[in-house]
Structure formats: structure tokens, C-alpha cells
């Protein structure tokens, strides 16, 4: 049965969520019948090349929603009856997953964080779905944000901060972002220096509705608050706002 599930490590959705979504879709669509056996947790983990913890998390969520049942010593099966209440629970869980992904997209996290190697967490924080911006493969929070009376707390489990995540946190903190792409920016008073990591043009938010000139030559470059800057990879421009 596991061959019928197609899990993508490149998807923005965590692996456990992909398992949940695909199982729910097959049950609701009638492809998987009531009483049909599911692969064991270890079998699905091995066949899909994900951790046992990931599959266990998915099965727990599916059982909580009433989509599957687990019988001691026998395994997991599609529930015999998926009544209206349980169907709503499954739908609510799907909506919860969509809410998680939407929260990340609103902060600019519209793609998987580019970590070069899989991260196996030794521990994780407890966070509500609305506070979780990214998860590990096992479904536990990798990045969580919690707003309180004293301010905003951020938990980051992975070992380095990806540029997308830094920009998202900057938006939360109300920091002015000069660009939405990867480049090196230095700013002080009316001077802004930009080093391009890719060929332009580059949209630069100057933060001021004023004329912008090249600080070295005095030539006019354009006008704020948003400037279209022609720049090549590896080139550095020093601007005066």
C-alpha cells in the first residue's frame, strides 16, 4: 500500500502532513475501503524513506481524526465507519495544516528552508499550530513564534538561519528590509551599500520618497520609495538617498 503514497522531500509540507493528506484523500475518495489494512509504521517508514517518528505522528493524527483505527497486535486499519463528527475532525485537521502553511507564507516563508542535511532533533518546544512556522520531518516544531505581553519570542531549532527565515523575523520585528532577495546590504543615515549575489535588476525599497544618486559619481540612479536598480552579480553599488 505504501507504494500508493508519493512523498516529496522538496514539498513545503512536512512529511507527516503529506502522509495524512494522502491517506485522508484516498479514504474519502473511496480508494481505500473500510477495514483495509495499512502498512505497519516500520514498513511505511522504510518504503517511503522517512523516520519511524514521522509515520507514527501521521498515524496518531489519522487515528485522532477517526480516519483509521489501531488494534493491539494486529496493526492499523481504515475505520469501519467515518461518521459526520469524525469527518469534520478530519476536515478540521486539514484546515489546521493549511493554516500552518499560510502563516509561514504571510511571513515570506513560501519554500522549504534550504538546509543542506536532514536535522534530527533531540528535543523540541511545545507550540500550537498557529505558533509553528516550520517543522522537522517528524512533525515537531523547528521554528516557532509566540507573541506575549512582553514581546515576541522565537524558537529556532536548526543550526543556522536561512535568509528567508531572517527576512521573516525582520518583518515580525518591524525592521525595514531594503530588498526581498539575497544580497549584502549596509545602511547608515542616508547611505546604502548593496552587493549583488545575482544579476539584477533589483527592487530596492529606499524608505524615502526622494531622489537617489550614486554616492561615488553623483549620477542620478532613480527615485524612492522603490527603486529599480540595474546591477550585476558580484557588483557593489553605493547609493545616497
Image (cartoon, helix red, strand yellow):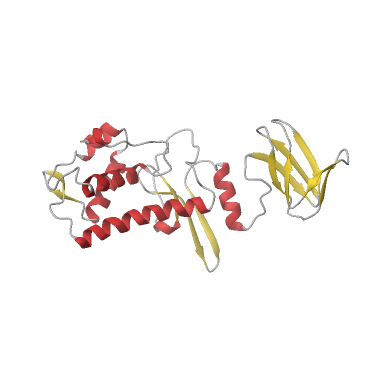
Q: Is residue 52 above or below residue 132?
A: above
Q: Nearer the viewer, residue 158 or 207?
A: 207
Q: Quadrant of the N terminus?
A: top left
Is residue 235 among what the camera can see?
yes
Q: Is residue 29 above or below residue 153?
A: above
Q: Residue furthest front?
A: 29
Is residue 127 among what the camera can see?
no
Number of residue marks: 0
Q: Is residue 205 above or below residue 45?
A: below
Find residue 52 and report its horizontal and vertical position in percent. 28, 39
Find residue 133 and report its horizontal and vertical position in percent. 46, 51
Q: Is residue 2 left or right of residue 97?
A: left
For the point 23% across and 49% down, which residue is it? Answer: 28
Q: Residue furthest right?
A: 218
Q: Is residue 133 left or right of residue 83?
A: right
- State which quadrant residue 136 falls in: top left
Find residue 165 and report its horizontal and vertical position in percent. 54, 46
Q: Is residue 154 left or right of residue 181?
A: left
Q: Nearer the viewer, residue 18 or 42?
A: 18
Find residue 234 and report its horizontal and vertical position in percent. 71, 30
For the point 74% across and 53% down, which residue is it? Answer: 225
For the point 34% across and 46% down, which residue is it? Answer: 17
Amino acid at each position: 500500500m505504501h507504494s500508493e503514497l508519493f512523498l516529496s522531500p522538496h514539498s513545503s509540507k512536512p512529511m507527516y502532513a503529506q502522509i495524512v493528506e494522502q491517506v485522508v484523500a484516498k479514504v474519502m475518495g473511496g480508494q481505500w475501503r473500510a477495514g483495509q489494512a495499512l502498512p505497519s509504521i516500520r514498513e511505511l517508514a522504510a518504503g517511503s524513506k522517512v523516520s519511524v517518528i514521522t509515520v507514527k505522528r501521521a498515524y496518531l493524527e489519522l487515528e485522532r481524526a477517526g480516519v483509521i483505527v489501531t488494534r493491539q497486535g494486529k496493526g492499523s486499519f481504515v475505520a469501519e465507519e467515518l461518521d459526520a463528527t469524525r469527518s469534520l475532525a478530519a476536515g478540521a485537521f486539514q484546515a489546521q495544516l493549511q493554516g500552518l502553511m499560510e502563516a509561514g507564507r504571510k511571513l515570506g516563508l513560501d519554500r522549504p528552508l534550504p538546509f543542506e542535511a536532514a536535522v534530527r532533533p533531540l528535543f523540541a518546544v511545545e507550540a500550537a499550530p498557529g505558533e509553528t512556522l516550520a517543522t522537522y520531518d517528524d512533525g515537531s516544531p523547528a521554528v516557532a513564534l509566540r507573541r506575549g505581553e512582553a514581546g515576541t519570542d522565537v524558537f529556532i531549532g536548526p543550526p543556522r538561519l536561512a535568509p528567508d527565515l531572517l527576512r521573516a523575523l525582520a518583518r515580525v520585528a518591524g525592521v525595514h528590509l531594503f530588498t526581498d532577495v539575497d544580497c549584502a546590504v549596509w545602511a547608515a543615515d542616508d547611505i546604502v551599500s548593496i552587493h549583488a549575489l545575482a544579476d539584477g535588476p533589483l527592487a530596492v525599497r529606499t524608505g524615502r520618497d526622494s531622489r537617489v544618486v550614486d554616492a561615488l559619481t553623483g549620477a542620478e540612479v532613480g527615485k524612492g520609495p522603490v527603486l529599480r536598480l540595474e546591477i550585476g552579480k558580484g557588483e557593489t553599488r553605493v547609493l545616497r538617498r
